[in-house]
Amino acid sequence: MTHGSRDRIAPFVRLGTLLALVLLLASPAVAENAPLPFLNTIELKPIKGAPKDRFEVRLYHKDPAVLASYLATERSYAITENKEYVAVTSDRYSYPRKTGQIAIKPSFVNDYDLDVFQRIREQVIGTYGAVPSDASLVEFVNKYIEKKNYTRGFDIASQVVGTKEGDCTEHAVLLVSLMRMFKIPAKVVFGLKLLKLGDDYGAYTHAWVEYLQKGKWKAADATLAIAVDRTYIPVGTLENEGMDFVMDLVPVLQMMPYRIEASGI
């Protein structure tokens, strides 16, 4: 597919993504005055009576069994389940149980094979050398996307290069493309980011990156440019990177809880 044809269908892809987001994330809508930018809020409260030093996250979901199955089967979380929520008590970030096939080739979403990426490649090499580290690529993406806002739907990588604009999905997509460009297998992850904000708690839907380096799983967040730890809870990944990738976002978004309770954050 040529760059021109991708440009022609891009508005339709963006519209489909926006419709999916509006329909599925109507309750946790974007909070304009959220403590952190470019994240969607979900109700989060402290677990009543829980010890402050005990880490536990209760994910309230309309179908807890579905969420529990993903967390216990696809990831390596220690969980308990009841009729209302799934409780996560793992003291570290949970990577996939199986490595499987993680992409390194370009795709419709991560189209780093286009000419527009040559300029980006030169900038990265000029700043960080011919073999940039994963941390360097995270830093580059965080600085490169200058306009951090919600105005984009879900741009593919070449669009992010042109606009230098977007939220966590644009940061994640561009980071995946740059990692693959420099031979690091990587993919986009969707999930939750939990924060303790003074005496209050915050929970946000979020996107970040998982990648393989020397056969070991790692994770990175180019949006916030902080370490990915146990306060990041993945609920899905972008496996389909073709023109119809929007349709694969629907089951991932349906995995998001409608309310969260936590302690020990």
Image: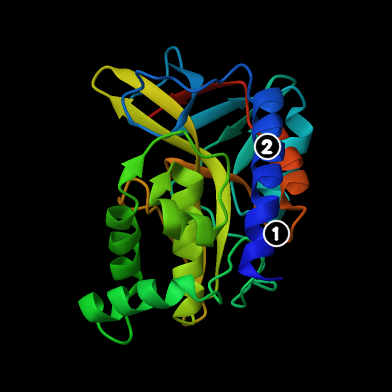
The one of 104 and 263 positioned closer to us in this rendering? 104
Q: Secondary structure at mark 2?
A: helix
Q: Which residue is mark 1?
A: 239
Alpha carbon separation for disc pair 1 and 2: 20 Å
Quarter in which the N terminus is drawn? bottom right
Residue picked out by circle 2: 15
Q: Nearer the viewer, residue 160 or 84?
A: 160
Q: Secondary structure at mark 1?
A: loop
Direction from residue 227 to residue 114 in the image, left or right: right
Q: Is residue 90 visible?
A: no
Pinpoint residue 231: horizontal percent, then vertical percent.
42, 40
Mark 2 neighbour density, 10 Å: few (under 14) some (14–19) many (20 or more): some
Name the residue: 31% across, 57% down.
144
Is label 1 in contact with label 2 (beta carbons under 8 Å)?
no
Query: Hey, which residue is sitting farthest bottom in the picture?
Result: 130
Image quadrant for the C terminus? top left
| Amino acid under disc 2 | Leu
Picture quadrant where residue 74 is located: bottom right
Report whether 17 appears left or right of 114: right
Say which residue appears at 21% left-offset and 75% top-offset: 127
Residue at image coords 36%, 71%: 134
In-front residue for pair 243/216: 243
Q: Is residue 88 left or right of residue 16?
A: left
Residue 217 at what x, y percent from top left? 50, 68
Give the residue type that dot 1 points to.
Answer: Glu
Q: Locate residue 243, reporting x and y percent.
A: 74, 57
Q: Is residue 230 above or below residue 137?
A: above
Question: Is residue 103 visible from the viewing direction of this image?
Answer: yes
